[in-house]
Image: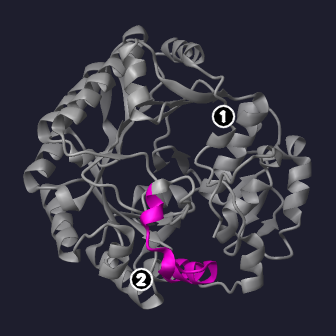
Amino acid sequence: MPTVTISNEMLDRYNRAGPRYTSYPTVPYWTKTFGEADYKEALAEVAAKPEEVLSVYAHLPFCASRCHYCGCNATSTNRPEVVDAYLDRLEREVTMIMEPMGTKRKVTQLHWGGGTPNFLNEAQMTRVYRLLERYFEILPTAEVSLELDPRIATRQQLETIKSLGFNRVSLGVQDFNPKVQEAIGRIQPADMTKNFYWICREIGFQSVNVDIVYGLPYQTAISFQKTLDEIVSLKPDRIASFSYAHLPSSRTNQKQVDATGMPNHYEKFALLQMELETLAAAGYDWIGMDHFAHSTDELAIAARERRLFRNFMGYTTMPAPHQLAFGMSSISDLAGRFVQNDAHLGRYQKGIDAGHLPIDRGMKLSADDKFRRRVIMHMMCNAELPYNLTKAQFGVDVREVLGNEIERLRLYVEEGLVSFEPDRIEVTEVGRYFLRNLCMELDPYLAQKQDRPLFSRTI
């Protein structure tokens, strides 16, 4: 896409704290009063519709060491028995949920996240996969993916992962520059990453992807361009490029980040624009807010055709009506409810030992929540708001429910963020940079007062 010119004054105005809209309503507005009984009610509704396919997520939180910059729910250990004890509880959780529901529910998307899923040894990985196979029918066309840390991977491990049934892998890279790596506590030589990447290709995974981060300490235009050039030379199928959110008050490990070289929001925005130029020239399309896919990839095709979806596992072309998630901190999205497990390892395990589903919080969506969710998620994925988007599902035009919000969006026409067409609101090339800000106009929860900052800044 061509570079657009955006003034510093405009960046200042739009650089607000706001949700990334991985979900709507967003996690901070879920309630602690939602508990195990509410979750079981949702599970019963899913059980009553055995024909509906599922997405499945397993959270494997362990790492050899905790990276300073990490915002994930992870814990470090060097003891295999700690992992085995966690897997015992994971198996009990899956059993408690699936035995009443019935086995062999069809799965169209399966993902392992962490932590570092390949921190598990081959026997442990096989155990988890066989557990899920026991209860689910993983369809031949399913996306079966996991996140990998090249620093601890071996060819034999990758061959085991491929033989189990995984067809997509994502490699954590973040940045190739040694000074940046030192500042974030993740030393990962470029040659190691590249060699690992080519082993993934040789073994024959259907899709090999990389994750990078912009806005890290000591990233400069010169250093980040070099990282981008090296990424492009590998030709990954997809690239996830996350904006670094420095929130040491809520992520205590980030207090270890060397923040002295942190780029300001003007410099960070320039890195994003450089990335867009470089990847576009290499044949990648910008997907949603923070992903890129080669123009021939099914994700890029879906984005061009405005049929992209997003869930807690990322962007997808294969949405399922329900997502079941297992493990500490994992989030299920089913039967019009969001459900999150306890994020504390000890409490999660004690809950399972006591025979309970260790729910920490959740939410049953109202009719208005469901309506706005459909609108916001489509806008975040496809950079448009067709007025008839909600007609088939809800029986009403978007304008009939969100008239006031649409009038607020008109205020962005003058600055060139949106255009009003006869049948839709179209997000412009400038507006793509501020998708979060635009969707915030549709979110009434943001008016609720909070005692502490909830979100990272939009730039």
* Res. 39 in view: yes
- Residue 154 shown left or right of residue 84 in the figure: left
Circle 2: residue type: Phe
In the picture, the quarter occupied by the N terminus is bottom right
Secondary element type, mark 2: helix
In the picture, the quarter occupied by the C terminus is bottom right
Residue 14 screen position, x and y as percent: 74, 70
- State which mark lies toward you, 2 or 1: 1
* Residue 302 shown in magenta: no
Circle 1: residue type: Trp
Q: Nearer the viewer, residue 212 or 275?
A: 212
Secondary element type, mark 1: loop
Label 1 Cα crowd, 10 Å radius (few <14 / some 14-19 / many 20+): some
Residue 412 screen position, x and y as percent: 83, 69
- Magenta range is 253-274
Residue 102 screen position, x and y as percent: 38, 11
- Residue 56 shown left or right of residue 3 in the figure: left
Q: Which residue is mark 2?
A: 224
